[in-house]
Image (spheres, coloured by chain):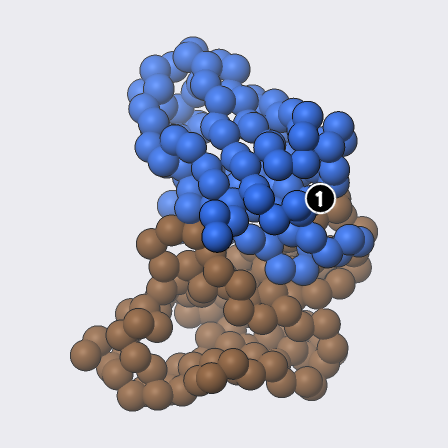
Chain colours: A brown, B blue
Amino acid sequence: EDKVVQSPLSLVVHEGDTVTLNCSYEVTNFRSLLWYKQEKKAPTFLFMLTSSGIEKKSGRLSSILDKKELFSILNITATQTGDSAVYLCAVEDNGGSQGNLIFGKGTKLSVKP
Amino acid sequence: NAGVTQTPKFRILKIGQSMTLQCTQDMNHNYMYWYRQDPGMGLKLIYYSVGAGITDKGEVPNGYNVSRSTTEDFPLRLELAAPSQTSVYFCASSSIAGQTGELFFGEGSRLTVL
């Protein structure tokens, strides 16, 4: 059965810290891996990764995919209280239903002032 | 920009009642989806649609129905509400053909079945 496992499930840090969130996956036919940030309401898109070793960056956030070891990491440097959210990792299975993203349970990040 | 709009935001139902969650998008996206999110869990796909008139089941379709009469609207119907359907429901849309890519989510509808 396809699955996506995120770790840790929750994390508390102080402003200015650097954090690394992990996502490992097992899917039959990998197509892409996506990261979303979910604050109080709707998830918002961060990154889509399809190729190994190519880092995606957006400000203080960056992410990379390892298709050989079947995992991705999301890094956040110089964290701010506004980074507090649940970070969702999702993997698209090429052989699955059109649009079926398999989501992990999320990592809840709390950034203290 | 409205994006994806869901209504209602909150609803309490009694067991056996029926209701429809409304979803509309103004981005002319062909692909639309309904997910449910239970506490501490990831999102699970209920139904999806690749265009007007076409719908298909996702991972957890039992107890739900959908229709897609227009590109903009994708309502989700619960016929006989059960406590197991207590959840937060998200509607989403995307434009990229052939793959999911970036999903645009609505703000969610919190449903409680008592």
In this rendered view, identify the residue nearer to me: A63 or B70.
B70
Q: Residue at x 68, y 85 (%)?
A: A54
Q: Residue at x 55, y 53 (%)?
A: B104
User: Is B96 positioned to the left or the right of A46 in the image?
Assistant: right
In this rendered view, identify the residue nearer to me: B29 or A34.
B29
Q: Which residue is mark 1?
A: B30
> Does residue A84 show up?
yes
Amino acid type at mark 1:
Asn
Q: Position of residue A72 (x, y in %)?
A: 60, 75
Q: Position of residue B38 (x, y in %)?
A: 43, 42
Q: Position of residue A102 (x, y in %)?
A: 62, 53
Q: Position of residue B111 (x, y in %)?
A: 38, 31
In this rendering, the answer to whether B113 lies above or below A6 is above
Disc 1 is placed on an element classified as loop
In this rendering, the answer to whether B111 lies above or below B80 is below
> Does residue B87 show up?
no
Q: How many marks?
A: 1
User: Is B11 positioned to the left or the right of A88 in the image?
Assistant: left
Residue B67 quadrant: top right
Q: Residues within 10 Å of mark 1 (few under 14, many from 20)?
A: some
In this rendered view, identify the residue nearer to me: B17 or B107.
B107
